[in-house]
Structure formats: C-alpha cells, structure tokens
C-alpha cells in the first residue's frame, strides 16, 4: 500500500474532479461534447429504422413550389387543401409546421375596394358585383372557415430577439396559466417574443403549438421543450398540441416527483388522461423531451402537397392519418442538424415526437439519474485506483477495458430496456485517465529496466524490438540457448578489386553509404545484426526475442536488400564510384545463441552448422548469377513464395547434398510469365538430371530467349557441353560439388 500511495492519492483526486462535474457543480465542455457524441451513438445503434404509417408528412417540396408557385401560397388554395384532406381523404388531425402571421391580399379584394371607394364610387353595378364577389376573395376568411370545427393545429414560433417589434399575431390559450408553478424553481425555457398566427385563424383552429426545438452547443437538435414560458404563462409544443387534439383536448397534468429537494422543481413528467389510457411524457429539468428519432429521413411517408391538390393520391394513403404539413425545400429554411443526419427536415422531428408520445417510447432523465451517475463513478473510480497500481500492463489494460465496456454496456442496456438516459462520459474519461496515470507512472519507474536492455541489445536489434523486450524483460536472456533460427550472410562481390581503386576515405564513405540502408532493411524486418566483417553483414532472426516467422522475415529482408542496393547505383555513379553487387545466403535450422567469447571480450552471437551453411550459400551466389540463395529448411518454412530450384550441391565441408533455391517473390505478386519461366527451368533441370542433354539444351535455349541476361541458363548450357564430352558416371546423382568456400 505504501508503495502505491502516491498513485492512489492522484487517482482519488481525479475521481473527485469528475464527480464534481457529474454532479454539475461545474461544467467541463469536452466531457459534455463526449456525452453528446455518446448520446448520438446510442440513438443510432438502437433506433428501430421502421416507418410509422400512422403519420404522413405533406411536403411543400420543390415539386409543389414548381406547380403552385413560390411560398406562401394564396389561402384559398390552403382552404381547398383542408377540404380535400378532411372531406375526401378523411384525415384525423392536421398540423402546420408553418406560421400564418400576415394577411393574404393576393386576391386583389383590397384594390377593388379602393377602386369602389374612388373611381367607381357611384357605379351601382360595380358595387353590387363587388358585394357578390367579396366572400370569394376574402382568402383568410375562406381558410379560417375551412379549419373551423376541424382538428387543425396551427404552428408558431417563440423568439428571444431584442427590440419592440418581436411580437406578431395571437398566441393560443396557454396550457398552464401564469402563477401555477409559483414557489417551484422549475427551469422552463423562457422567451420574450413570438411570431404567431392571425387572430381569425387562431380563433378558428382547434389548437396551436410552438415548433421551437432546443439546439445544443454543437448545433444539433436532440430535445424539444414540451412546455415553454412566455409572459408568465406556459405554452405547449406543436407535437403535444396535435396529440391532445387527436384525443379531444384532454387536460394536461404536471407530474411531480415525491419529496422535495431545495433548488429542484420536481416536474418530471406531463400526463394526458385519454380514452385510450394515460399517456406519460417524461421531461428533463428544462421541461424538454428527447426526440425519439426512428431513423434517418424517410421514417414517415412523404406526400407532395401538389399531389393532394391535384387528386393524384390514393385515399388509403391518407385515410385516418395524422398529417403534418411542412417543407423539405432548401429555400424555405426548415432543415436541421440532428443526431441521425446533418441535414434533416424540421417537420419530421415533430413527427418523431408525436410517434414517440403515442408509442410511449420516450427517453427519461429524472433527477435521481445524476445521483446514480455520481455513485457509479465513485465506485468504479475507487476500485480502479486501488487495483490498477497492483497490476502489470497487460492486466491493467484488460481490467480498464472491461470496466470501460461494462460502463458503456450498462448505459446502453438502461437506455434500450429502461428508456433511461444514463450519461457515462465522466466515468469513461475518468477510467481512461486513471489507466493513463498508472501506465505513465509505470513507464517512468520501469524505464531503468528499459535502459538496461537497451544497453545490452541496442547495438544488435532495432528500437522496436528493444521496446518489446522492455515490456517483457523476463523473456530476454544473454545465456546460451538452442533455438530454431534463420541466419543471413551478405557480401560484396569482388570487394578486394573494388577497394584497390579507391583511397581509404572514399572507401570508408562508400562502405557507410551501402551498409546503412542494408542495415535499416534488416531492422525493418525485425532482424538482429550480429556483426560487420569488412564488407560482409551477418544477421539472424529468432533471438533475442522469439520470432515464429523468422524464415519469412529473413527472405523478405534479403530481397529488399537487393532492391535497396539497386536504388543506390545511380548515386554511386554520380560520385564516380564503381557499381556494387552483393550475394546473400540464407539458411534456417537449430543453432546455439547467446553471449559467447572469453573473459576478455564477449559478444551476443550464433554458432552451429546451419550458420556455416548460410555463409557457404552466400559464397556460391556468384556461381549461379543470382542475388539470393536460401537453403531447403528456409524454403520449406515459407510456402507462399515462388522459388527457383537452382541445384543440388555439396558445399565445402558438407558431405550430404542439399537443394538450393532462389526466392523470386510472393506467389500473389509474381507474374504468370515469370512463374511459367520458373516451371520451364524446373523441367530443364529434370531433363538435365536424367542426362537427356538434347531436350535439356532445347529448354535452356528457350529460356535464354525469354531472359537473355540470366546467367543461370548459360551456366547449365556449359555444363551440358562439358558432360557431352565427359559423360558422368553411371551412378551420377546430379549433384554439383563445390571444392571451395
């Protein structure tokens, strides 16, 4: 405990910091942003993505604007629309996501009246005709008459604009009168102005509701205030007004939590007692409800208003439906950013609210959820603060990830099955910080071990492997061990002749120029550089860290070393240096590895017959005119490469013949033509071993035409010419014997 006291103390401070934010003593913006992201993710993960057939959106879309003209339309057309919807199609409720704040004078009645009062004042015939026409030209009255005694709900907006002209039209009767909540500190959304409908229209309508959403700090609409305050009175939203109208205007009742806490109003739900049963609408501290989005745009049937006006809609599509009239036309500016889409019609947000109220599928965030979040945060935080310092990195990651998953999973389960919003952003950030604190502390404390390992192996292995060894120091040993490994030797061809033509400084520069990129390639493929021997590099794979793919990594390194050297040739030519070519031998097998030497000097190296064979393979690359030769063990360990079987040979110091191969490349990357060429050479080799010199020579001639620069084919042609004059013994096994290293 004393050892981890500092870590535990710092962890407890982190817990208290986030507990304060969860309890809303202060606000951390980055946590609030994360909370919004998690809310959106949960919503998208669990929304039903189905179409609610009870609600239809009549869309003032581009098609309607093209056929009927720019909005607003004359209200005689809207009167006709109402008659069609109720009389022909039999809808049950119509709600307008638009406001009618100005008089409609498009009929020309006002102009005719002015003419009748001036130029044609004494014209009895004109006056009689005007009196007869007037009822047909009073479009506002026509519209008012068409919505009277019908379930039509008008929309309006509330505003907080400054100035004296921030009020227009007439508000409906409030759902709660002024003073009803006196003494209760309820945080209603409050406004100081409104844009409402003409008095005649409002009086004729069954109800009206505001269509104001609550826009969060990131510009996204997640909530709608079910009841908002203006002038001390309280007004319902459009969606709530439509539901109440659907059920015959039942009284809206406030629901208060039991008990009383200082500073908390206690209003947690609204209730409607309908013929179909009680409907409960949960609200948060701002008397707002989360919009229960069903899915992306199109979760409700859209019908163009123009199609209704021109009788292009089947009756069944609208009969007994709840209808919302709104717009998706971009020019009418009723598009919102929502959790399900960056551009989303505002009218569909109201449709989602109506659907959620009817289904009683609304998310709740009662006051006690804040307490639950704080308690969970404290429990998880204290447990991790005492547990993580006792664990190693792997177990700490596992425990932290598990706690993270449990926390988020619990919030998702509560969301989906209990319709409760349990915010866990504070807990998740706290878990991440507690983990980071413990890992950082462990890093600095354990860096001494890493420095020791770096001192031992930094000269042999790439930094990435040093990192891995530092994480698992128990797997690293300098003591002798017997392992399956792969060894690589590379050597410059004709180095003695090359070095004689350069002065010592130029030779040193040249050595550095080509040894550095080749060493980087070995490091890239997780190799360990054993030593530099003049122009030769010796490297191995499989130690000090085990490597299950040691043969593959060595082959890839050998091929890439040849490519890296080829890329250097133009630079060498610019410097006036000769071209450099290297041979690479690679072999796999069981060898001894560890610190070897004497009391005077030791080195971490490998020894054994397989090491010697790798060196011999490098030496004979020039005999076959190839860049890389691998032994049979290496070839068998990596099966997804294309290999050219070069020969069966006895190298110096070995009695048993071995097969040697040239790795061409990965099977998936080698062209079909090159693979065909390899197969053709294998056939030539088969004929060669059978001493069918004529057929073998014919195949080799074909191969030379395919690849004139390949020295290998010429070498076999020379052997055949020799054997024609000097036939091999009857028991010849096709093995070529090397007398030199």
Image (spheres, rainbow, N blue to C red):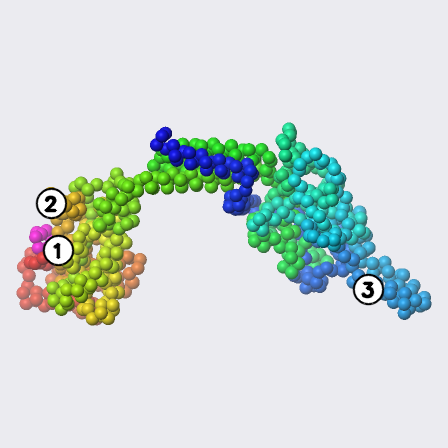
Callout 3 secondary element: loop
Between 568 and 503, the residue placed more toward the observer is 503
Estimate the x, y position of residue 355 in percent, counting from the top left.
64, 44
Estimate the x, y position of residue 477 in percent, counting from the top left.
21, 41
Measured in 3D between alpha carbons, the distance from the residue under mark 2 to the one under mark 3, in whole angstroms, is 114 Å
Q: Which residue shows up at 15% across the image and 50% down it?
A: 611
Residue wearing tag 1: 616
Q: In this view, does 28 lie above or below 715?
A: above
- Residue 280 placement, left or right of 603: right
- Residue 309 placement, left or right of 538: right
Q: Which residue shows up at 14% across the image and 58% down it?
A: 534
Question: From which residue to which does the magenta span run?
Answer: 650-657
Q: Is residue 739 above or below residue 395?
A: below
Q: In which quarter of the image is the N terminus?
A: top left
Mark 2 or 1, which is nearer the eye?
Answer: 2
Checking the image for residue 108, the label placed there is 3
Residue 640 magenta-highlighted? no
The image quadrant of residue 372 is top right
Estimate the x, y position of residue 109 in percent, counting from the top left.
84, 63
Callout 2 secondary element: loop
Q: Which residue shows up at 30% across the image and 42% down it?
A: 447
Q: In which quarter of the image is the C terminus?
A: bottom left
Residue wearing tag 2: 600
Between 33 and 524, the residue placed more toward the observer is 33
Q: Residues within 10 Å of mark 3 (few under 14, many from 20)?
A: few
Q: Which residue shows up at 17% across the image and 55% down it?
A: 532
Measured in 3D between alpha carbons, the distance from the residue under mark 2 to the one under mark 1, in whole angstroms, is 30 Å
């Amino acid at each position: 405990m004393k050892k981890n006291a500092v870590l535990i103390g710092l962890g407890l401070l982190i817990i208290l910091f986030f507990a304060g934010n969860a309890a809303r003593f202060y606000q951390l913006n980055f946590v609030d942003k994360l909370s919004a992201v998690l809310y959106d993710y949960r919503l998208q993960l669990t929304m039903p993505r189905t179409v609610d057939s009870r609600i239809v959106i009549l869309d003032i879309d581009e098609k309607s604007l093209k056929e009927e003209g720019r909005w607003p339309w004359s209200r005689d057309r809207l009167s006709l629309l109402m008659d069609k919807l109720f009389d022909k199609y039999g809808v049950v409720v119509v709600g307008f996501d638009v406001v009618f704040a100005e008089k409609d004078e498009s009929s020309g009645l006002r102009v005719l009246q002015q003419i009748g009062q001036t130029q044609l004042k004494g014209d009895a015939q004109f006056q009689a005709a005007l009196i007869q026409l007037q009822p047909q030209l009073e479009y506002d009255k026509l519209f008012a008459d068409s919505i009277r005694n019908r379930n039509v709900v008008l929309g309006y907006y509330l505003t907080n604009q400054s100035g004296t002209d921030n009020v227009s039209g007439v508000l409906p009767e409030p759902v709660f009168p002024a003073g009803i909540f006196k003494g209760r500190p309820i945080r209603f959304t409050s406004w100081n102005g409104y844009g409402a409908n003409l008095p005649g229209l409002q009086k004729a309508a069954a109800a009206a509701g505001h269509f104001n959403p609550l826009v969060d700090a990131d510009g996204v609409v997640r909530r709608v205030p079910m009841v908002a305050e203006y002038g001390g009175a309280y007004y319902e939203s459009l969606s709530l007004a439509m539901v109440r109208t659907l059920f015959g205007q039942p009284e809206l009742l406030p629901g208060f939590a039991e008990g009383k806490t200082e500073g908390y109003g206690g209003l947690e739900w609204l209730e409607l007692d309908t013929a179909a049963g009680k409907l409960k609408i949960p609200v948060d501290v701002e008397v707002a409800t989360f919009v229960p989005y069903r899915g992306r745009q199109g979760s409700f049937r859209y019908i163009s208003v123009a199609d209704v006006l021109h009788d292009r809609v089947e009756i069944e599509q609208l009969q007994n439906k709840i209808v919302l009239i709104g717009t998706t036309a971009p020019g009418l500016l009723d598009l919102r950013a929502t959790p399900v889409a960056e551009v989303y019609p505002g009218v569909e947000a109201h449709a989602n609210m109506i659907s959620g109220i009817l289904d009683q599928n609304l998310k709740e965030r009662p006051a006690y959820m804040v307490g639950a979040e704080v308690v969970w945060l404290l429990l998880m935080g204290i447990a991790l603060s005492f547990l993580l310092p006792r664990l190693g990195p792997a177990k700490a990651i596992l425990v932290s990830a598990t706690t993270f998953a449990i926390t988020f999973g619990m919030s998702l389960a509560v969301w989906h099955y209990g319709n409760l919003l349990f915010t866990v952003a504070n807990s998740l950030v706290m878990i991440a910080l507690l983990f980071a604190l413990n890992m950082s502390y462990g890093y600095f404390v354990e860096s001494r071990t890493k420095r020791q390992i770096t001192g031992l192996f930094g000269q042999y292995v790439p930094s990435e492997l040093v990192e891995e060894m530092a994480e698992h120091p128990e797997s690293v040993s300098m003591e002798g061990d017997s392992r399956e490994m792969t060894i690589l030797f590379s050597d410059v061809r004709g180095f003695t002749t090359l070095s004689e033509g350069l002065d010592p400084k130029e030779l040193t520069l040249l050595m550095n120029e080509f040894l550095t990129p080749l060493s980087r390639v070995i490091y890239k493929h997780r190799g360990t550089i054993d030593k530099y021997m003049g122009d030769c590099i010796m490297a191995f794979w499989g130690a000090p860290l085990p490597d299950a793919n040691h043969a593959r990594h060595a082959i890839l390194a050998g091929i890439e070393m040849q490519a890296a050297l080829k890329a250097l040739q133009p630079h060498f030519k610019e410097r006036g240096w000769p071209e450099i070519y290297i041979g690479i031998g690679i072999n796999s097998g069981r060898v001894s590895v560890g610190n070897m030497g004497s009391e005077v000097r030791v080195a971490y190296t490998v020894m054994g017959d397989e090491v010697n064979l790798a060196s011999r393979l490098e030496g004979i690359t020039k005999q076959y005119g190839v860049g890389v030769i691998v032994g049979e063990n290496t070839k068998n360990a990596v099966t997804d490469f294309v290999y050219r079987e070069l020969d069966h040979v006895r190298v110096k110091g070995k009695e048993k013949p071995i097969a040697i191969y040239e790795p061409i490349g990965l099977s998936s990357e080698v062209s079909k033509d090159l693979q065909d060429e390899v197969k053709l050479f294998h056939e030539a080799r088969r004929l060669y071993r059978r001493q069918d010199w004529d057929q073998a020579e014919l195949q080799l001639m074909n191969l030379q035409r395919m690849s004139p620069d390949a020295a290998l084919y010429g070498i076999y042609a020379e052997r055949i010419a020799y054997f024609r004059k000097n036939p091999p013994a009857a028991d010849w096994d096709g093995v070529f014997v090397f007398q030199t290293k």
